[in-house]
Amino acid sequence: MRAGRGFLIVPPVVIVLAVMVAPIVLIALYSVDVKTNLPFTPTKFTWSMWKDFLPPSEGKFPNPFWHRFEVSMVITVVVSLVAVAAAYPLAYFLAFGARRSRYTLLLLMLAPFFTSYLLRVIAWKIMLSNNGVINTAIWDLHLRSHGDGVPWLIYSKFSVGLVLFYSWVPFVAVPIFVLLDRLDTHLLEAAQDLGAGRLATFFRVTLPLSLPGVIAGFVFVLIPTTGEFITPLLVGGPGSQMFGNSIQSFFQDTPNWNYGAVLALWLVAVVFVMLLVFGRFLATDLREANS
Amino acid sequence: MNAAAGRLGKVILGGYFWLMVVFLYVPLVVLVVFAFNDAYIPALPLSGFTTKWFHAAFANTDLTGALKRSAWLALLNGIAASLLGLLAALAVTGRRLFLRSVWTTLLLLPLVVPYIVLAIGMVIVIHELGYQASLAAVLAGHIVISLPYSLLVIVPRLRTLDESIVEAARDLGADTVRAFVLVTLPLIVPALISSALICFTISFDEFAIASFLAPPSSPTYPVFLYSGTRTPALEPQVIALGAIVVTFSIALVVAADVGRRVMERRLAS
């Protein structure tokens, strides 16, 4: 078009500035006590809440919310790694073993991912809970005595990890599948003509070439799971709440918006660092999708 | 094919794939099965067939009210986010745009900012402005988290358009707006429809932002579902409604894909 149409960017940018950027700026102001929601409380710039939260903590024990952050990151990283490892063979099967039905099978695998996230977590809660489907099935089969539920089945790190894994694993397979599907199979034949076995071909040709998809898949779980709070809310116990739940509690159960703002801003910072480290793998993905 | 996996390897991979498919569908099947189970608590063995939970759910005006509220919200979000996405897509695919990559990055950022942060940030903004939490605030939040998806659907479609046909329309005397309405718009209608559907779904299922910003007297349907799981008397109704929604969304996903394939086949022949 000859006439400039750049001005059309104004309305969408304004709404993102108003609804996303302005709130984050206010969170930053709350985190240093320049603003507060408490009436009749004087406000004055201070780093004290940040010093309290970030290690090294001054007291004998580490800050409980920092500890929660560490626990949460362990869950996140473990879930992301396991999801990538479990998704790789799925993508490999779709790309090399499914032949012409590959897109039908891909749809079959992805369809549950497009149903309500909350409903899938609720379904897991029904299965895992103490009088739930799995425990009552075990009692029915007389594998455990009636009323004696498997202790780690719900309200544990296991249940939180399992449900997060369940939610993300089909989605992780997508970027890996896209790369494997596009892989020139002549390369694999060439490797084998030159004497490599199937295993050697996989580790020295296929895997390295699909690595960008693997990393993209990893980040696809890592970033959303870092701020997760719904799954622990439903199937987590006191010891398996995640960092998002700490933030939530400061705004709902025990209101202290200023301290909650410190945690929220820290979460944003962590996600941005992840984006800086892994962003180029996602960017190649987007650029390829555009071309 | 042979170079990637041997015969045994393929069998093992296939077996693993189907096991995972079972794993992915079990929770959804459980939801549907227990929607018809004649007991308050979902447990084995099954207690007999009933459809009473569906009747109970649709007789519950709190539940149907929440469902209607969410449907309206999702509809408005589908329209508003797609229109804003269209504006942004037209701007970023234009020939000249000052700070193009800055705006693109800004509009895609809601993909990675945790919803919990967005939600509490909006709570603070609303407090600072002296307003009360409202469904309008939920809508504003939903528009912002939907915008990136709208953009990612519409931009590739605009890029594949042949600019020369728009220029031809202009050479034949159409002004910018007429050329857009008569030439560009009809060609991107499919992308706009899929954007609207995606944005509808995002809003309809969204819990985090709605749980902070929807007034307690007017919960959206996911917020109602969540409170339903904490009330044993409501749980069977939650399951019944969940079974309907899950079945419906799977049918929709499959129908959309089949429709797309049929259209592509027609275009190809």
Image (spheres, rainbow, N blue to C red):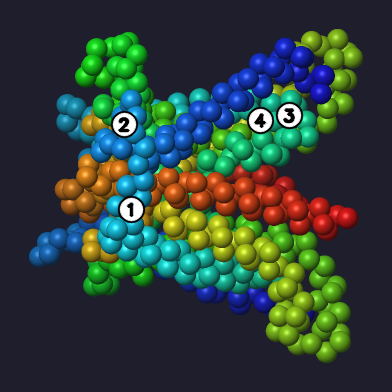
Q: Chain of mark 1?
A: B
Kindly identify the residue that appears in the image at 67 percent across and 35 percent down: A105
Q: How far apart, in angstroms, are the residues tagged by discs 2 and 1?
A: 18 Å
Q: Nearer the viewer, mark 3 or mark 4?
A: 3
Choose the circle earlier in sequence order: 2 or 1: 2
Say whether residue B148 is visible. no
Kindly identify the residue that appears in the image at 40 percent across and 47 percent down: B242
Q: Nearer the viewer, mark 3 or mark 2?
A: 2
Q: How far apart, in angstroms, are the residues tagged by discs 2 and 4?
A: 40 Å
Q: Chain of mark 4?
A: A
Choose the circle earlier in sequence order: 3 or 4: 4
Secondary structure under tag 4 reads helix
Reading the image, the residue beneath label 1 is: B55
Reading the image, the residue beneath label 4 is: A91
User: Neighbour class for label 4 at 10 Å: few (<14), some, many (≥20)?
Assistant: many
- Check contact, mark 3 vs mark 2: CB within 8 A: no
Q: Chain of mark 2?
A: B
Kindly identify the residue that appears in the image at 32 percent across and 10 percent down: A143
Q: Based on the displayed image, in which of its 4 quarters is residue A236 positioned?
A: top left
Quadrant in which the N terminus of chain B appears: top right
Reading the image, the residue beneath label 3 is: A98
Q: Nearer the viewer, residue A201 or A138?
A: A138
Q: Where is residue B264? Give x, y as percent.
A: 78, 54
- Check contact, mark 2 vs mark 1: CB within 8 A: no
User: Neighbour class for label 1 at 10 Å: few (<14), some, many (≥20)?
Assistant: few
Kindly identify the residue that appears in the image at 58 percent across and 40 percent down: A110
Reading the image, the residue beneath label 2 is: B47
Q: Amino acid at mark 1?
A: His
Q: Amino acid at mark 4?
A: Ala
Left or right, A183 with respect to B66, comes to right
Secondary structure under tag 2 reads loop
